[in-house]
Image (spheres, rainbow, N blue to C red):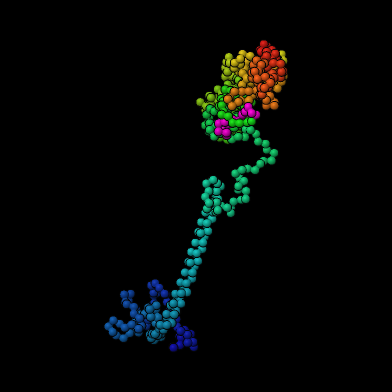
């Protein structure tokens, strides 16, 4: 081995290139310095030190060589040093591995990290979608979604469908849900019956068109409901329904329309106090009918012209209806119940002793004799009967003629239902006859 000219005294291998640089593994070879003063043309073929020319001549020492191909090194005096193939191959392989291996490792690591991130994000997104689906539509979840969302659900998830009792809160009969068609009518400003929101009507709706009544045997049962209308709604029922309607209106209507409805309810209360409930009831029906036909109509403004028109109707000149019950007259006598249809018998009512109404429509709280009136019970045949406080029925034959063909064998009560005397029936009661003459 020749001594290294760059490091005198050391037998180290010289650099593979004339300029001391490592050969490039791939790509276009770098520009090589001139060797022995010869200039290689740009179009000249590059040949190795061990290759022979095409004419079969000996290798020429002045031929330009390519470092990656031959690895020859220029020496002083124009001589060239033969390359070591083993050293060249080892150096080239080492350089290639040292340059390529780190890049391949980094690329694989990055790809693995990206793949892990994508998989984790997809898993979290799937869990989030399952929780959202479970919260939005709990009745339509499948088993896979339930299993996915089970870990994120709180222990109180099942109690969310049925709220816990509120301490101190007392529910009422009007807590029954408002029918959907009524809510739609309020939202669309359509006319609807307030009587459809009474406790009896909503209970009948829950019982599929049947209402709870007291039967002849003293037990409660369901009977086909008779639909009422606002023309016969009582003042007590109207005032119990009005807050429900206003509450729904505040939820589904604009604030301006809800405010007008609230003022209208106040106007109805004022008219009922000054002109009686029949006038207020008809005024309410006509105002809401007009508002349903024309949404621009302001029912919150009290229309005194309409009040006067309604109050001047002959059928509404009486101050109170029979459904409101009897009231005390100024002279202390009980006022007649004049708006109900007259009795079919032409005599006083067998329940209260009053005149001018039928037994089935009597709503008196006391009889003309000052007694607690009997209860009206509807039988299976649809006919009313009278029951005392012990739920024993009064004999209708005794009440009509003070006689009964069954005598002591009769299972019903032989007693006056008005004054509770045993000498006569309700038709012959002097208290009832006196009330009829005074009427």
Q: Position of residue 132 (x, y in %)?
A: 54, 49
How far across and how far down the image is residue 92, in percent? 43, 77
Does residue 349 appear anywhere in the picture?
no
The quadrant in which residue 257 appears is top right
Report the front residue among 283 and 336. Answer: 336
Image quarter where the N terminus lies is bottom left
Q: Quadrant of residue 276?
A: top right
Check the image and report above or below for 179 versus 44. above
Question: Going 47% across and 85% down the picture, which residue do you hit?
Answer: 12
Q: Is residue 70 left or right of residue 368?
A: left
Q: Position of residue 291 (x, y in %)?
A: 53, 26
Q: Residue at x 43, y 82 (%)?
A: 87
Q: Is residue 154 above or below residue 347?
A: below
Q: Is residue 45 magenta?
A: no
Q: Residue at x 39, y 77 (%)?
A: 68
**Between 55 and 158, which is closer to the camera in this rendering?**
158
Total label count? Answer: 0
What is the quadrant of the C terminus in the image? Answer: top right
Image coords of residue 409 (percent x, y): 67, 22
Name, please, the residue furthest toward the left. Answer: 55
For this view, does 257 lie left or right of residue 431? Answer: left
- Look at the picture and state if 15 lies above or below 283: below
Q: Is residue 175 visible?
A: yes
* Viewer-nearest residue: 82 or 378: 378
Image quarter of residue 302? top right
The outermost residue toward the top is 437
**Magenta segment, which residues?**
204-218
């Amino acid at each position: 081995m020749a001594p290294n000219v760059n490091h005198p005294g050391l037998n180290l291998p010289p650099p593979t290139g004339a300029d001391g640089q490592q050969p490039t593994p791939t790509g276009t070879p770098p520009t090589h310095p001139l060797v022995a003063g010869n200039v290689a043309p740009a179009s000249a073929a590059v040949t190795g030190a061990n290759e022979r020319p095409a004419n079969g001549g000996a290798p020429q020492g002045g031929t330009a060589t390519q470092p990656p191909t031959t690895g020859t090194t220029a020496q002083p005096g124009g001589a060239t040093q033969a390359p070591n193939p083993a050293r060249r191959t080892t150096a080239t392989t080492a350089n290639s591995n040292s340059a390529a291996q780190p890049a391949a490792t980094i690329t694989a690591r990055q790809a693995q990290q990206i793949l892990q991130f994508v998989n984790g994000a997809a898993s979290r997104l799937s869990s989030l979608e399952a929780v959202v689906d479970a919260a939005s539509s709990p009745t339509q979840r499948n088993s896979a979604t339930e299993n996915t969302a089970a870990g994120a659900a709180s222990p109180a998830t099942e109690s969310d469908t049925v709220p816990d009792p509120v301490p101190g809160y007392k529910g009422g009969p009007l807590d029954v849900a408002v029918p959907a068609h009524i809510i739609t009518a309020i939202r669309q400003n359509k006319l609807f019956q307030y009587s459809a929101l009474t406790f009896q009507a909503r209970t009948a709706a829950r019982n599929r068109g049947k209402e709870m009544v007291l039967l002849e045997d003293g037990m409660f049962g369901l009977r086909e409901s008779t639909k009422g209308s606002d023309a016969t709604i009582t003042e007590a029922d109207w005032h119990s329904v009005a807050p429900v309607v206003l509450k729904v209106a505040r939820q589904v209507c604009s604030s301006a329309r809800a405010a007008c409805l609230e003022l209208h309810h106040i106007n109805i209360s004022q008219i009922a106090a000054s002109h009686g409930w029949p006038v207020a009831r008809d005024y309410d029906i006509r105002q809401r009918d007009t508002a349903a036909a024309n949404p621009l109509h302001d029912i919150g403004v009290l229309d005194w012209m309409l009040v006067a028109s309604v109050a001047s109707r002959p059928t509404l000149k009486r101050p109170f209806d029979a459904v409101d019950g009897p009231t005390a007259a100024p002279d202390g006598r009980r006022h007649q119940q004049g708006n109900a249809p007259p009795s079919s018998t032409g005599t006083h009512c067998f329940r209260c002793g009053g005149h001018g109404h039928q037994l089935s429509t009597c709503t008196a709280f006391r009889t003309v004799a000052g007694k607690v009136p009997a209860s009206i019970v509807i039988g299976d045949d649809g006919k009313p009967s009278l029951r005392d406080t012990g739920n024993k029925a009064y004999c209708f034959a005794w009440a009509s003629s003070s006689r009964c063909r069954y005598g002591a064998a009769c299972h019903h009560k032989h007693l006056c239902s008005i004054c509770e005397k045993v000498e006569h029936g309700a038709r012959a009661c002097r208290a009832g006859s006196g009330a009829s003459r005074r009427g």
